[in-house]
Amino acid sequence: ASHSVCCTVCESRFSLILKHYVCSRCKRDVCRKCSFAEVESKVLSIEKARMCSVCVPQLHSELEEKLKDVSLWKSRCAQ
């Protein structure tokens, strides 16, 4: 499998010292600095995943929206 020569977030060049990782969500090639190791995510249907610094905030926003929807639904059912 081929991968980028540079991190797709910060554009640092990969090397023997600066390893590349693949975001489990968007499949971007990212460096360690631009990825979060082992983000637990039942949303992705996997136990642990490495996700990039772009996807983590997006996932948080999506989860917050889902929680709001559930809260709204529960409050309507309680009435």
Image (spheres, rainbow, N blue to C red):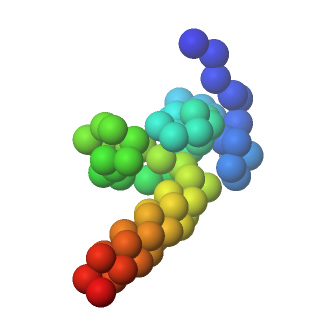
Q: Quadrant of residue 13?
A: top right
Residue 3 visible in image: yes
Q: How many labels does the image show?
A: 0
Image point (68%, 49%), residue name: 9
On screen, residue 4 versus residue 59, left or right, reads right
The residue lying at 48 percent from left, 47 percent from top is: 51
* Quarter assignment of residue 74: bottom left
Q: Give the residue furthest to the top.
A: 1
Residue 3, x across and y down, in percent? 64, 23
Q: Is residue 12 above or below residue 16?
A: below
Q: What quarter of the picture does the N terminus occupy? A: top right
In the rendered image, the vertical position of residue 11 relative to residue 57, given as above or below: above
Image coords of residue 45 (percent x, y): 33, 38
Q: Residue at x 70, y 29 (%)?
A: 5
- In the rendered image of this protein, does residue 22 appear above or below residue 38? above
Q: Which quarter of the rendered picture does the C terminus lie within?
A: bottom left
